[in-house]
Image (cartoon, rainbow, N blue to C red):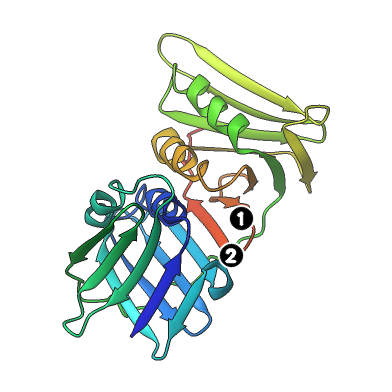
Amino acid sequence: MFTIKMTDAKLWKNLIGAISTLIDEGTFDIDKNGIKLRAMDPSHVAMVDFEWPKTVFDEYNCDTPTKLCINISEMLKFLKRIGSNESLELSLDPQARLNMVLKGKYIRTFNMATLEPITDAIPAPKISFNAIAKISTSCLKNAMDDISTVSDHIQFEVTPKKLVMRASGYLGSASVEVGTDSEDLLSLSIKENSKATFSLNYLSQTIKAASSVSDVVTIEFSKDMPIRLTFEMQEGKLQYYLAPRIENT
């Protein structure tokens, strides 16, 4: 059993919103050290890897390691009821139902059923990245919006001096260049010039949702290999992996 309390309920709401862009159901591993989740989207094209240590929470008690499987979309329905200056308490009752208590001007309690947990562990991908760019989340989000005007795919390319995001479609093309002289490109490291193409639908939803929990994202990729997005948080980890779209040349 466990009991978790957060003074700022919106922090949990924003995190679950970021996770919900890829999965409908998720199994959280909860133990004395904190909370973890690693899950694939239904098509096995993308993966989310999340960790929050117990120090993120204002109160954290877990006497027995627990696997908590929930319908992410259903939880979001409750969390969207969060108002300003409300705290959140999460716990399991004896019937293994999840209790969510919101405390503000008054106390509201929501109760939802849990699901059969997924016990098969998903290994972390072992990938060598040739290009690493750290960029402001707002800049990346705006670039996604620009590219989406012409295509549903986006190509990332790096050279020693810049990160380029581009796409072309039936009616036109668009590109966004962020150079090392830009305040939005915080760092750029490359082993070799690299480019790869990805689904814009996956990326734009993920980045839009994650922008509520992080101001900085690290983009890592290699030619025709999965991309990894790491969203910086004060504590813990929020990463996404997305398989590339292999283009015929």
Image point (42%, 8%), residue name: 171
Residue 26 location (% of width, % of height): 32, 65
* Mark 1 residue crowding within 10 angstroms, few (<14) / some (14–19) / many (20+): some
Image point (56%, 67%), residue name: 56
Image point (20%, 72%), residue name: 115
Q: In the visual, does 94 lie left or right of 28? A: left
Viewer can see residue 62: yes
Q: Is residue 80 above or below residue 197?
A: below
Viewer can see residue 37: no
Report how far apart the C-alphas of labels 1 and 2 lie in the structure: 6 Å
Three-letter code for the amino acid on which mark 2 is drawn: Gly
- The reply to whether the C-beta atoms of the residues labelled 1 and 2 are less than 8 Å apart is yes
91 or 174: nearer the eye?
A: 91
Q: In the visual, does 7 lie left or right of 75? A: right
Q: Residue furthest front?
A: 105
93 or 15: nearer the eye?
A: 93
Q: Which mark is residue 236?
A: 2
Residue 200 location (% of width, % of height): 44, 33
Residue 191 location (% of width, % of height): 79, 48
Q: Could you tell me how many numbered marks the image carries? A: 2
Q: In the visual, does 149 lie left or right of 235? A: left
For the N terminus, give its image quadrant: bottom left
Q: Which mark is residue 156?
A: none
- The local secondary structure at tag 1 comes to loop
Q: Which mark is residue 233?
A: 1
Q: Is residue 144 above or below residue 56?
A: above
Q: Is residue 31 above or below residue 226?
A: below
Q: Is residue 124 above or below residue 234?
A: below
226 or 107: nearer the eye?
A: 107
